[in-house]
Image: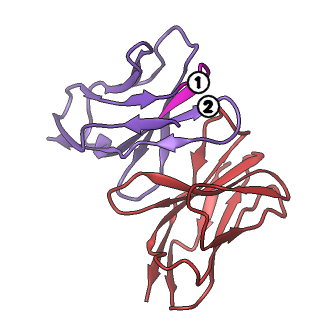
Chain colours: A purple, B red
């Protein structure tokens, strides 16, 4: 069975600094995808970034990058130049290449300090 | 603009009452999903549908029912059999199953009176 672990319940970062949110996963599949979502206090889940298991380069989307270490089964989210609007819950999720098995981690609450 | 809409934003349920949460998408996505989120926790899958007139149970389907009569719509009914329905409900859609990105609606918060 697939499982996502996010070991940081809460994180603080100073505005304009970079922060790394940890995500480790467990799967026996060879083909899978890793996702990060942001959930502000309004509740909507906002898609941030995707990494496929066969992608050789780490994914980047603007200030977001995914540090993918396949052998360690980790998919950490790096946010550069943090902004006050980045304060939110962040969820790591994984899917596999057939069927429906989209699994979410418990989330990390990020607070950006002015 | 394409997107997913959910209504209502807040819903109150009396004991023994069935209530229906609406989810509509205009992204032309084939797959749709319903998730439940309890305070301080991640998302758990209730039901999903890969195509019109077909749907499958997720991890916590007991006390819930769905229908998929149109590609754009995937309503969720919380029945009286669901003894602890107070939660935040999120609808999502994707082009298909598997590695496709899921996009979410704004959610419905259900409270029991």
Q: Is A65 rendered above or below residue B59?
A: above
Q: Secondary structure at mark 2?
A: strand
Q: Position of residue B67 (x, y in %)?
A: 77, 66
Q: Nearer the viewer, mark 2 or mark 1?
A: 1
Residue B95 located within the stretch drawn in magenta: no
Q: Disc 1 designates what residue?
A: A29
Which sits in the foreground, B113 or A45? B113
The crowding category of the residue bearing disc 1, from other C-alpha atoms within 10 Å (few below 14, some 14 to 19, many at least 20), is: few
Q: Disc 2 designates what residue?
A: A96
Instruction: Answer yes or no: is residue A97 visible.
Output: yes
Task: Give the mark, 2 or 1, whose residue is nearer the N terminus.
Answer: 1
**Same-chain check, marks 2 and 1:** yes
Whether the residues at callouts 2 and 1 have beta carbons within 8 Å, the answer is yes
Q: Which residues are magenta?
A: A28-35
Q: Is B109 rendered above or below residue A38?
A: below
Q: Position of residue A86 (x, y in %)?
A: 31, 40
């Amino acid at each position: 069975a697939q499982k996502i672990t996010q070991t940081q319940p809460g994180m603080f970062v100073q505005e304009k600094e970079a922060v790394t949110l940890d995500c480790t996963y467990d799967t026996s599949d060879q083909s899978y995808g890793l996702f990060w979502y942001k959930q502000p206090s309004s509740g909507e889940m906002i898609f941030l970034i995707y990494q496929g298991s066969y992608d050789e380069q780490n994914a980047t989307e603007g200030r977001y990058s995914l540090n993918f270490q396949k052998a360690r089964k980790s998919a950490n989210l790096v946010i550069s130049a943090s902004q006050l609007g980045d304060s939110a819950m962040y969820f790591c999720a994984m899917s596999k290449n057939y069927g429906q098995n989209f699994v979410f981690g418990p989330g990390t609450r990020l607070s950006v300090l002015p | 603009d394409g997107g997913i809409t959910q209504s209502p934003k807040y819903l109150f349920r009396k004991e023994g009452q069935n209530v229906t949460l609406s989810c509509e998408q205009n992204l032309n996505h084939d797959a749709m999903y319903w998730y439940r989120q309890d305070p301080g926790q991640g998302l758990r899958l209730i039901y999903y549908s890969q195509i019109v007139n077909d749907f499958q149970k997720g991890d916590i389907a007991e006390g819930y029912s769905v229908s998929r009569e149109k590609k754009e719509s995937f309503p969720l009914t919380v029945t009286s059999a669901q003894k602890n329905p107070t939660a935040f409900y999120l609808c999502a859609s994707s082009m298909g199953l598997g590695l496709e990105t899921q996009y979410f609606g704004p959610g419905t918060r259900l409270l029991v009176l």
